[in-house]
Image: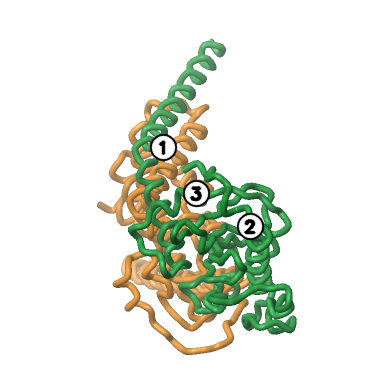
Amino acid sequence: MMLKNIGKNAFLLGFVAALCVLILGLVNQLTSPRIQQQNMISKLAILYEVLPDADSSQHHLLQDCVLVTDARFLGRDTPQAVYRWREQDAVSAYIIETTAPDGYSGNIDLIVAATPTGTVLGSRVLRHLETPGLGDKIESRRSDWILSFNQQPVSDSNLQKWAVKKDGGQFDQFTGATITPRAVVNAVRNAALFLQQHPELATMPANCEE
Amino acid sequence: MSQFKEIAYQGLWKNNPGLVQLLGLCPLLAVSSTLTNALGLGVATLLVLLSSNIAISLVRHHVPNEIRIPVFVLIIIGFVTVLELTINAFAFGLYQSLGIFIPLIGTNCIIIGRAEAFASKNPVLPSAFDATMMGTGFTLVLVLLGGIREILGQGTLFDGAEQMFGSWAKGLRIEVFHSENHFLLAMLPPGAFLCMGMLIALRTVINNKLQQRQQTAQKTITRSRVTGTTQ
């Protein structure tokens, strides 16, 4: 009797689980193309925000992309994408995904647009977990701070200027939050240095899976 | 009808999930740093609670007692995931501001709590009403806490509302006072605990006052009846 009961309950539980899997699978199938499209749109919007000369008709920007891995300069030991922006076939700018591993609470994922010679064109924060009201001023919608990277060159002679003012550099820190902007400044500088040190990025075959 | 009145009283005041049952403290304290976030999580929780209560009430006669908890968990998590995928696909702006809270709803004990305590024993209509009232009670506490913390922390209300409701909501933003230095404590989790403690204390004080008044009222009634019988 008891065994029969256990069997019945196990079957019922399995049935409910299977039903849930079926429903979730179905919903996932139905929504995933739209979710991908939405992610693409928001990614494109950010790409065009850091690259003012580009216009939204140039969708091929997302395809011309190589994956790179460099834990020291890009803050992650997993591959990150570098998008190439070409004018008359010569690369005039890169847009690189990078990570500041030393944020106040975890990783800060950024996107940095820079020329092959190392001039930062712009940067935006993609994801972060910094303190609301303090560290989140790195977001462009909360403060203009991130715009202070626009058109800033990085070279061996001005490396010490790539720091927050507290450390003797040229970038503002926030009242009550120094760790977050310090992490972002370092990550943007390192991304620009990485692009300078790797001229072969321009000729590598595109290998991002989209 | 009095059953519905009782459910509303339980959900909104007597057994308020936020202030009395203290269920779902994790999302309650984590996302109530601004009014907008608080409202977003409150409404999302209300939606999941409503759908899970209805579903569980519908299947309550078919689920054996021994396996009811895992079945309820499956149903609840199913609804949370469907809600998350749907919002992600069709309301991307909302998803970006609510994204991290939605999976958190699954961990909110209010939902399994109401499923177990109410929906598994009652018909669909009262269950749906119970979910609405409990969800509203929870949302009210969240909104109150979010409002207090946002005013104390950065002197505004509805900051960032446009990310949830679209660009028209920019006009909702109210600047109560202007300060360059934010009051950090109110924005951080310890401030949430302190605010929450104050709110619970305030509710207890009001509740005690109400009960006292009720008791004195009852006393006078009984006494008058006693005098009535002796005369």
Q: How crowded is mark 3: few (under 14 residues within 10 Å), some or many (20 or more)?
A: some
Residue at 72% x, 75% y is A159
Q: Which of B3 and B115 is in front in this view?
A: B115
Residue underneath mark 3: B103
The alpha-carbon separation of the residues under discs 2 and 3 comes to 43 Å
Rendered location of residue A191, percent (x, y): 64, 63
Snapshot quadrant of residue B13: bottom left
Chain B visual colour:
orange
Identify which amino acid the numbered label 3 is placed on: Pro
Rendered view: B138 above or below A177: above
Badges 2 and 3, same chain = no
Q: Which chain is disc 3 placed on?
A: B
- Locate residue B101, reporting x and y percent: 49, 55
Measuring from the top left, give residue A165's x and y in whole percent: 69, 84
Question: Which chain appears green?
Answer: A
Q: Do labels 1 and 2 share a chain?
A: no
- Residue B73 visible at all: yes
* Residue at image location 40% in from the left, 37% down from the top: A28
Position of residue B14 relative to residue B82, above or below, is below
Tag nearer the camera, 1 or 2:
2
At which x and y percent is residue B103?
49, 49
